[in-house]
Amino acid sequence: MFRSVKNWLTILILALVALAMIVAWAYVVPPLTNRLDQQKLADQKATTQLIITTVQFYLRFDPVTARLYVYANDSSGFRNALEVLRNRSNGRVMVFTRHLAVHDDTGGVYPVDIGDFPMISEALKSAKVVQGVVTTSTGRYAATAVPIASNSTVAGVVLVIAPLKDVDAAVAAVQRQLFFATVLVMGISLLLGYLASYFIARRLKRIERSAEAIAGGDLTATVPASVEDEIGQLAATFNIMAVRLRGAFAQVEYERDRVEVLLNDLSEGVIGLSEEGTVTIANPASAELLDEPVRVGAGLDETFPADVAEAWHESRRDDEAQAVVFVHGERTLEATTYPVAGAADFTSIVVLRDVTSQARLERARRDLIANASHEFKTPLFSLAGFLELIDEGNVSADERREFLQLMRQQVDRLRNLAVSMLDLSTVEAGSIEMESEDVDLETVARSVLDEFQVQAQAKELTLAVDGGEAVTAWCDEQRLAQVLRALVDNAVKFSPQGSSVRVATRAESSWATIVVSDDGPGITAGELPHVFERFHRGSEERATTSGAGLGLSIARELTEMMGGRIRAASDSGGASFSVRLPRAPRRRAQSADS
């Protein structure tokens, strides 16, 4: 019952009204009773002198016998006088001797017990009028004891008693009125208190419903504030709180959306792990990198190889980031584990990065160093051997000239190798700036072929451009010439005596293609995928030609920097290399394969 504000407010109002009525009763009834009693006693005291005068007029005291007697035997007169006193006091008049014996009595319904009226003895002892209110078995009485003196001797006592029934009736009437008033007031208070409590509880209930709505996720819930009292101020404060909560939740949602967008747009995979090592969250990139969806609730061992699991355990143990690189299919991935502090449902995260290109570059760097060391070693050893033979002086003039010729070839080989490696490092570092423009492919092709006329004549080769309509491409003319030099040089080297090297151009809607072909032995199927790798030289090339094996690799890098693509093809009739370039500047890079 007391769980409802309405109920306990109603009970509180009733309790306050009841307390007020009790206070009113205590303030009215006892004082009223006492006042009426005192009024009765005062009325009796007013007749005291009349009593003394009347009694002394009729009664005499015999000091010898200590008896009271009626003067001149006028008993009827004395009786009449007592009746007058009885009427005046509206009560009963009794005369007692000094020995407490009843001398005269105006009579009454109930007998009188002297023990109920202690004022008789007190009046005899003190010779003074003694009054009081006496409660007997027959009711309450106002009693006045008047001593009768004779020659300085108290001869008897006149006791006047008056019933207080009228006082009790008046007080009872007042009490009845108070009771009826109490019942009426409590009834009205119950009704008004219930109504007031109902309206107060209803206003509080509105606040409660709004709070429940907000707790359920409805942040638009408000409380109408109609009355500017404490509850109205509470409602206004509640509405302010709701507005601030909406702002706070909006900010949290905004930040959550931002984090979600960032996670979804990240190229790195982000996976959250619980304290037990189970997946609690994963962004789309993680599924793409691992080639399968990352299931929430999956264990660490199900999702990652053992190396990553071990790194995760070390990260938790040392409370610091740990990184490990592992191979997953055709990709090389780097997994970095980070401990996370806070109250999130994950205690650590694993960040996946695709380091395939970096791993490939690292392998290429190692291969470059190994291959460069190997390529430099042969000519250097040859030069050292020739110098040692010449230094010994046991060679003829013809042999000396032959050694010098061979040494010059090795020096040229070293110089070409150094230049090629310098070009390759410049391309890889991104230090080359492309100055693209519309370039006529036939013009560039004829210019490059003219540079190889001497080598062609030595092998009786025919260098030809299969031209037609003008074909232009959007590229860097100098870099395109460098690409063509590498392709033509390669074709001249492998073309047999008396054959031809051809350069052809053709145009498509968005692309222009220039093809360099020869009539050489071609490229075997096993070596064709590797022709653009650094330091790659076919078995036939190593046996019959010199070179570092970097020309085609540099040509591929330059072509891709110009937004194009280079391809090699071969059959029994020779090899061909096609360079495909865009015909116009492009806002976004598109694949030359399209």
Image (cartoon, rainbow, N blue to C red):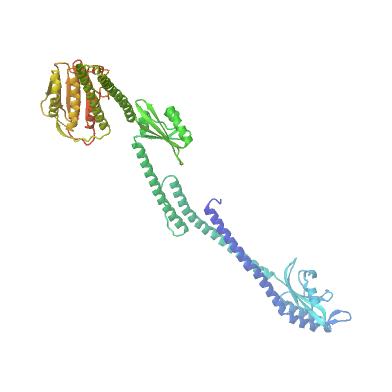
Of all residues, the one furthest to the front in this rendering is: 393
Residue 317 can be seen, yes or no? yes
Q: Quadrant of residue 28?
A: bottom right
User: Residue 497's spot in the image, x, y percent?
Assistant: 15, 16
Of all residues, the one furthest to the right in this rendering is: 64
Is 244 placed left or right of 476 in the picture? right
Is 236 placed left or right of 158 in the picture? left
Quarter of the image where the C terminus is located: top left
User: Please, is residue 13 above or below residue 463 in the view?
Assistant: below
Is 218 placed left or right of 63 in the picture? left
Taking depth in this image into account, of 532 and 376 the one nearest to the observer is 376
Taking depth in this image into account, of 388 and 366 the one nearest to the observer is 388
Residue occupying image coordinates x 39% and y 45%: 252
Is 424 placed left or right of 3 in the picture? left
User: Residue 165's spot in the image, x, y percent?
Assistant: 69, 69
User: Residue 472's spot in the image, x, y percent?
Assistant: 14, 31
Residue occupying image coordinates x 86% and y 79%: 67
Residue occupying image coordinates x 46% and y 55%: 234
User: Residue 293's spot in the image, x, y percent?
Assistant: 38, 30
Residue 277 can be seen, yes or no? no
Q: Quadrant of residue 303?
A: top left
User: Please, is residue 258 above or below residue 371 in the view?
Assistant: below
